[in-house]
């Protein structure tokens, strides 16, 4: 005996609850299934808790810099990790409860907290029950990838999720992976007081970014006392008493490092391996991501995949946009597409890095005739006043069309200011629209028109 619904949504990450809201408002009967914590990665193990930690780490950092601003702080600045965790948990918990309360109180929505598995392209098993629907939406997110490195199964290790369970300060935190997750944890725990070493297999950090940005990020981290071990071609692990020995085998430096804790931050993998997708005939790629078209349909009619599990963004903002695309096409007769989206992401070290559109490397590879403008944060009044002058801003423009191709801001307030540029790109307007705008002084964004007024050929 099965229960029929108009739609079934699997997973309570960013796309799922909002989609349930739209579908139920359209008088559809919706079954909503979540096997673990409501809110997905962002609320529970991603954006919200980690940015709460970043804020605490920033407070400690600024307290140590108080004398730079003429302020005296008596005594050593120490992080109370129990209190830091309690603050983080309270912020994250409030969001999680809010999502669950919203769903459970939603008219026409029935919430099931259990594991969902496909029985066919229109049937879902949840515990001992079977549900059917004409439309099924997969929104199951992803988790930390555990690399197949020698000895990894012989030592205790942390992931981005279990890292959040710590209420103690690691004596020496060794982080495997020099990209977004790893670097955010590296800086925050260094500011909390840990010795921190980042081990990266490649020759530079944040591989997807331009070399000048990667170099600047490296300088920022090293200036705070974070050890970086690049070109680590043969990483391995072994226990040593209560510690963990990490083989690095770098070109320079000691071949092994001894640490108290190890964080694995080498990538993500989708939560699609235990859904029974093969019984529904849903195609996945070699990494397990659900294959979707430009409007997020899978290869099976009536089944969509949204959020991190489709490999088309892996950010909270792209997951939410997935919901908007599906809802617009289904309910509003508005043919929105994934390809309309301009790439945008941020790295939340301090100062933050925001990147939109094409990188300089991508522009050069494209062969486009382009203009470039660069300005160091040392020449931006607002940054000088705040005593935070590390980094720079960079904008690239198509010489022929005058349209902005991409931009990056590594610097204080850059994650907010860059939206001035992003909005002009979405408006498909020439760069002169922004160049001639009059911004408020003193701000970080007021220098964007100045940068655009000093463009030079990219050679």
Image: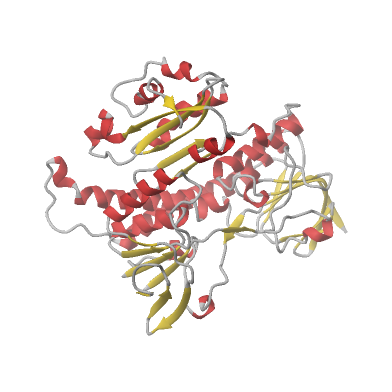
Rendering quarter of residue 205: bottom left
Q: For the view shown, which residue lies furthest in the right direction?
A: 1
Residue 253, position as x, y percentages in the image: 34, 69
Q: Can residue 156 be seen here?
A: no
Left or right: 48, with 37 as reference point: left
Q: Is residue 376 above or below residue 220?
A: above
Left or right: 390, with 142 as reference point: left
Residue 217, position as x, y percentages in the image: 37, 48
Q: Can residue 58 be seen here?
A: yes
Q: Residue at x 57, y 33 (%)?
A: 367
Q: Residue at x 40, y 44 (%)?
A: 213
Foreground of the two, 399 or 48: 399
Q: For the view shown, which residue lies furthest in the front direction?
A: 459
Left or right: 8, with 404 as reference point: right
Rendering quarter of residue 295: top right
Q: How is the image coloured?
A: secondary structure
Total label count? 0
Residue 289, position as x, y percentages in the image: 69, 54
Foreground of the two, 299 or 332: 299
Give the position of the N terminus as an image quadrant.
Answer: bottom right
Q: Residue at x 84, y 53 (%)?
A: 121
Residue 122, position as x, y percentages in the image: 84, 51
Q: Is residue 346 above or below residue 238?
A: above
Foreground of the two, 208 or 434: 208
Foreground of the two, 215 or 25: 215
């Amino acid at each position: 005996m099965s229960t029929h619904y108009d739609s079934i949504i699997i997973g309570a990450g960013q796309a799922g609850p909002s989609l349930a809201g739209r579908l139920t408002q359209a008088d559809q009967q919706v079954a909503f299934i979540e096997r673990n914590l409501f809110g997905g990665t962002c609320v529970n193990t991603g954006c919200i808790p980690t940015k709460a930690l970043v804020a605490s780490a920033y407070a400690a950092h600024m307290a140590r810099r108080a004398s730079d601003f003429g302020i005296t702080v008596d005594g050593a600045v120490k992080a109370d990790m129990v209190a830091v965790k309690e603050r983080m948990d309270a912020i994250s918990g409030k969001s999680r409860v809010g999502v669950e309360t919203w769903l459970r109180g939603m008219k026409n929505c029935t919430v099931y907290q259990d594991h969902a598995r496909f029985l066919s392209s229109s049937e879902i098993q949840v515990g001992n029950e079977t549900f059917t629907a004409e439309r099924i939406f997969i929104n199951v997110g992803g988790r930390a990838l555990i690399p197949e490195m020698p000895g990894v199964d012989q030592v205790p290790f942390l992931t981005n999720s279990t890292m959040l369970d710590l209420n103690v300060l690691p004596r020496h935190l060794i982080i495997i992976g020099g990209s977004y997750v790893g670097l955010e944890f590296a800086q925050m725990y260094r500011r909390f007081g840990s010795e921190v070493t980042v081990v990266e297999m490649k020759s530079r950090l944040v591989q997807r970014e331009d070399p000048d940005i990667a170099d600047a990020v490296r300088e920022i981290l090293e200036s705070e006392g974070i050890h970086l071990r690049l070109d680590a071609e043969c990483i391995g692990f072994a226990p040593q008493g209560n510690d963990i020995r990490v083989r690095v085998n770098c070109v320079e430096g000691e071949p092994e490092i001894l640490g108290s804790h190890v964080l694995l931050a080498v990538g993500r993998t989708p939560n699609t391996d235990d859904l029974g997708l093969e019984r529904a005939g849903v195609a996945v790629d070699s990494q397990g991501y659900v294959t979707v078209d430009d409007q997020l349909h899978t290869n099976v009619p009536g089944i969509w995949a949204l959020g991190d599990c489709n490999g088309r963004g892996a950010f909270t903002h792209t997951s939410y946009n997935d919901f908007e695309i599906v809802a617009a096409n289904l309910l509003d007769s508005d043919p929105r597409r994934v390809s309309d989206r301009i790439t945008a992401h941020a790295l939340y070290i301090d100062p933050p890095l925001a990147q939109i559109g094409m990188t300089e490397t991508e522009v050069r590879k494209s062969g486009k005739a382009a203009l470039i403008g660069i300005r160091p944060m040392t020449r931006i009044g607002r940054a000088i006043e705040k005593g935070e002058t590390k980094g720079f801003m960079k904008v690239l423009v198509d010489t022929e069309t005058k349209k902005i191709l991409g931009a990056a801001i590594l610097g204080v307030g850059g994650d907010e200011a860059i939206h001035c540029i992003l909005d002009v790109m979405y408006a498909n307007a020439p760069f002169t629209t922004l160049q001639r705008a009059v911004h408020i002084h003193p701000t970080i964004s007021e220098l964007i028109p100045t940068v655009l007024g000093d463009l030079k050929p990219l050679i």
